[in-house]
Amino acid sequence: MRQFYRKLGRAARNVKNRILKTPGVAYIEHRIILAKAIIKSAATITVAFIIMILLITVAAYPKLVPSITVAFYQWNNIFLNFVTTTIKASETIANTISPIGAIANAIHNALLVAAPTFHITLKGAASALTSSIVALDSTEKYLITQNIAAWTIALATLLYSQYVKTRARARYRR
């Protein structure tokens, strides 16, 4: 049986190699490979651009995330009930299994103690940046956001292409 499958595999590889060696199929395969690379790079740049815009928007509007979260909870009672039920179920499980409950309670208390200090630290660190961005009008914010995102993506692309070139040269020298 093994010999049969080996012969069958060899025959299939030979047929595939003969088909791929024909000029028309080889040209189409080459174009598909190039298209895959173009699509992947365009998708990567688009996703990175969207992430940069979201990060800059959150920096410009620090109360955006909490206000959107509250509005979502007010708008969608089903999700609010799901979250409260999940919290109650996890508390019940933690109380039922005492070692897990003690660990979870200790983590919860530590987070409650650390939360105000963490909030003050982040607020102080970001106040200089956000206060200058918040004072701008909408057009200036849009231009700054667009330029930062575009320059970041362009520089990352250039750095990555240089990295790929140096790796290709190092591989070619070997």
Image: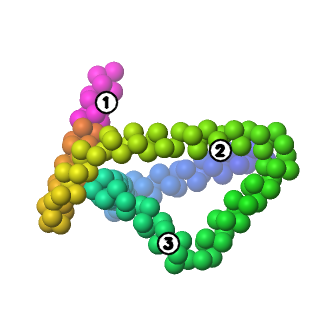
Q: Residues within 10 Å of mark 2 (few under 14, many from 20)?
A: few
Percent position of residue 83, x then y: 64, 65
- Measure how far apart labels 3 and 2 are at the Cα level: 25 Å
Q: Is the magenta stretch mostly helix, strand or loop?
A: helix
Q: Nearer the viewer, residue 90 or 41?
A: 90
Pick whichever of labels 3 and 2 is earlier in the sequence. Answer: 3
Q: How crowded is mark 1: few (under 14 residues within 10 Å), some or many (20 or more)?
A: few
Q: Mark 2 points at which residue?
A: 108
* Residue at 69% in and 59% down: 87
Q: Nearer the viewer, mark 1 or mark 2?
A: 2
Q: Which of marks 3 and 2 is in front?
A: 2
Q: What amino acid is found at the position of numbered circle 1 in the picture?
A: Arg
Identify the image quadrant of residue 23.
bottom left
**For residue 26, above or below residue 97:** below
Coloring scheme of the render? rainbow
* Residue at 58% in and 54% down: 12
Q: Residues within 10 Å of mark 3 (few under 14, many from 20)?
A: few
Q: What stretch is highlighted in magenta?
A: 161-174
Percent position of residue 63, x then y: 37, 60
Tag 2's secondary structure? helix
Pick whichever of labels 1 and 2 is earlier in the sequence. Answer: 2
The residue lying furthest to the top in this view is 174
Residues at circles 3 and 2 in contact by the CB criterion of under 8 Å: no
Q: What amino acid is found at the position of numbered circle 3 in the picture?
A: Phe
* Residue at 48% in and 66% down: 69
Does the magenta segment cover residue 128?
no
Identify the image quadrant of residue 6.
top right
Tag 3's secondary structure? helix
Percent position of residue 139, x then y: 14, 66
Q: Name the residue under label 3.
A: 72
Side of 167 where 150 appears, left or right: left
